[in-house]
Amino acid sequence: MVSRKHKKDHVLHEKLQLLRSITNSHATNDSSIILDASKYIQELKQKVEILNHEIASGQSSSYQNSWPVVTVEAVEKGIQVILYSERSCPGLLVFVLNVFEELSLNVLEARVSCTGSFHLEALGVQNEQTGESIDAHIVKQTILHAIENWSENNDHQD
C-alpha cells in the first residue's frame, strides 16, 4: 500500500516537473508550477484569439506579429493590463486610456515604452464611487475592441 502511494507521488512529481519545463517555469513548489502553467495557457489562448481575429479579418500572416498582445489579470490591488506589440503603435495609448476611463478604472501605476515597439504595463483600480467590481475578462474584451477601433482608425489614415 505504501509502495503504491509512493509510486503515485513519484509519477505526480515527474508530471509536475514536465509541466514546469514545458511552461519555462522557475517555480519550485507544486502550486506555483500549476499557477505558472495556468498563465501559460492563458497566453496561448490569447495568441489563438489573435490568430483567429487575423484570419477572420483577412489579415496577412506578415501582420501577425504586429497585432498587440493583451494580457489582463485581476491582482490583489486591482486589474493589471499588459500590452505588447513588436511595432510602434502611434495613438494606441489614447485608445487604451479611454478604456480605463470608460470602465471607471483609475491608473494606479503605469509604464509605457514606444521606442521601436509598444509596451504598456498598467495597474488599474476600481473607482470607489461606482461600487461595482470589474471583471478582468470584460476589461480584456473592451481593450481588444479598442485595439480594433485603433487599427481601423490607422487604416483610414494611411
Image (cartoon, rainbow, N blue to C red):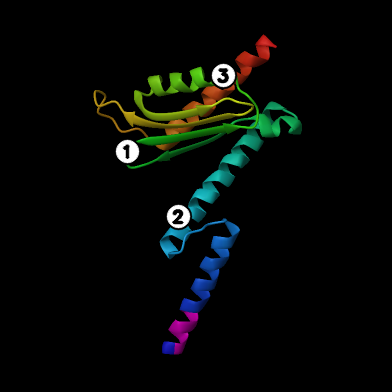
- Residue at numbered disc 3: 149
Q: Which mark is in front, 2 or 1?
A: 1
- Residue at numbered disc 2: 35
Q: State the residue in front, 150 or 107.
A: 107
Q: Residue at x 52, y 76 (%)?
A: 11
Dot 2 amino acid type: Leu
What SS does tag 3 mark? helix
Q: Position of residue 22 (x, y in %)?
A: 60, 59
Distance (Cα) linking label 3 and label 1: 29 Å
Q: Which residues are magenta?
A: 3-8
Asked if the residues shown at circle 3 and circle 1 are in contact, with their CB atoms under 8 angstroms apart, the answer is no
The relative height of residue 100 versus residue 39 in the rendered view (above or below) is above
Q: Residue at x 57, y 56 (%)?
A: 24
Distance (Cα) linking label 3 and label 2: 33 Å
| Residue 39 left/right relative to 55 | left
Q: Is residue 26 visible?
A: yes
